[in-house]
Amino acid sequence: MRGRALATLLVCAALVSAAVVTLGAPLVPHVQKSFGVGTEASQWSYTITLLVGATLTPLLGRLADGRRRRPAMLVVCALVTLGCAISAVGTSFGVFLAGRALQGTAVALVAMTIACARDLVAGPAAARLVALLSITTALGAGAAYPVTTFVADHLGLRAAYGGAAALALLVTVAVTLGLPGWVPVDRASQLDVPGAVVLVVATSLSLLAISQGNSWGWSSASVLLLGGLALALLAWWVRLEFRAAHPLVELRLFARRNVLAAHLTGLLMGVSLYNTPVLITRIGLAPRSTGFGLGLTLSAIGVVMIPIAICNYLSSRAATVLARRWGRRVALAAGGVLGALGPLALTAMDGRLAWLVLAVVLTSCGAGATFGTLPGLIVDAVEPSETGSATSVNILLRAVGGAVGSAVTAALVGAALAPDGEATSTGLTWAALACTATCLASVVVSCCVPTRHGQSGRLAVVAVEPVPLPRAD
């Protein structure tokens, strides 16, 4: 029973964190109207959360592998709670963005919970729990969309983020009371501080350049300078990691085909996972006079997105069966194909609700199949002491894909606005095709996955002598 309670705690923490991170997707148009900002500026309410998450996840994932796991998770939960509260009470767009930035630390909670599951849950139950935690990004979004859109539509933006703050506070209390502080005694506690600082700065500069490229100009001195500095710092960081005794990210793991394929797939699929819901919201809210819009309310959009959680869960289970029978290569490829068909359905929008629902179902099925398969590739290939770091890199790359995709979506939609400043079918079509292209690219990457070795469908590395669940400190 105690192991089940811990598993419930980890799943709830991951679900709430995922819900908070993706909360910005369906509310981007609402933010635009509430604060009176432009299309590209409103997209920042989503981009900045992914940007902060991408920069801090490797550091927090490494902390989750060591003896500072429990205090690190408590600090993250507290920051998420504070960020939601700031967004709820902020009267200016700048203050609202500051809150959304703090909420970005929630991105790392999924990787941190996976590291906890690997150490604290015994036997085959660990495999099932790790797979479930990996898809909480989509499950949390699917569960949160109907509720948050309804609350925002009827009670306003403040109420939506106030409710998120209340949920995050509950998770903070639960983690404080229920998370054991135990880690294996032989686990290294050293933290690669220089590597962490350099990676945070390099990632921030690169994502800032990408997100502002459309506003500042892709060939502007500011974008080129930021991009050049980011590349130089990343090169320096790689050198630091290869020389560090306890690196922040074990880059040598990238030489393993499973790990490399998992990371590339996470990056590519992240583009569609995080940004197709934004496109669905914009199309659903657009008036019927546009020829492609449905003129729905925000609450109705939330109802349309209800299948996300259901389809993600069912497709992840189906992918497990598929991986056992034909290998993870086939499961990953199937996820990529389904993920590509989702945004492609949006390009056929002609004012009929069926196309929107089809896009939701296909996109969520693709995400569930893909992200339900990825943790097995990573966990099979790394040592337990590297689980948090390796999975944090995968979560990082998903967030990077989402941040890049968010910036590209804003650029493509913003480049073809109507005279009244609203999105047009041209911009939305190009943005949807960009999501489709990255999903198809992930299908190509899946060919790198070995056909037989480590394809049992269960996490081979956890098939060792069960670790007894320790008492909380």
Image (spheres, rainbow, N blue to C red):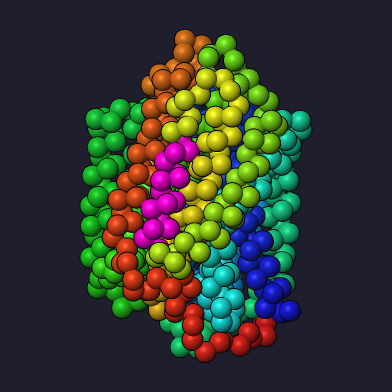
Which residue is more in the foreground, 395 or 458? 458
Q: Is residue 163 above or below residue 132?
A: above
The quadrant of the rendering that contains the N terminus is bottom right
Please indicate, yes or no, whether residue 100 appears anywhere in the rendered image. no
Q: Is residue 465 above or below residue 387?
A: below
On whether residue 342 falls in the magenta region, the answer is: yes
Q: Position of residue 29 (x, y in %)?
A: 58, 28
The quadrant of the rendering that contains the C terminus is bottom right
Q: Position of residue 403 (x, y in %)?
A: 43, 43
On whether residue 414 falls in the magenta region, the answer is: no
Please tell me which residue is depicted at 29% across the width and 36% down the height of the picture. 223
Q: In the image, 135: left or right of 8?
A: left
Q: Position of residue 322 (x, y in %)?
A: 47, 61
Count of numbered badges drawn on the protein: 0
Q: Residue furthest right?
A: 155
Task: Place residue 221 in its image quadrant.
Answer: top left
Span shown in magenta: 328-343
Q: Residue furthest front?
A: 325
Q: Is residue 20 above or below residue 225?
A: below
Which residue is more in the foreground, 380 or 423? 380
Q: Is residue 380 above or below residue 166?
A: below
Please indicate, yes or no, whether residue 259 appears anywhere in the rendered image. yes
Q: In the image, 80: left or right of 264?
A: right
Please tell me which residue is depicted at 54% across the width and 25% down the height of the picture. 283
Task: Place residue 412 in its image quadrant.
Answer: top left
Which residue is more in the foreground, 265 or 319? 319
Task: Place residue 288 in its image quadrant.
Answer: top right
Please tell me which residue is depicted at 27% across the width and 43% down the height of the picture. 227
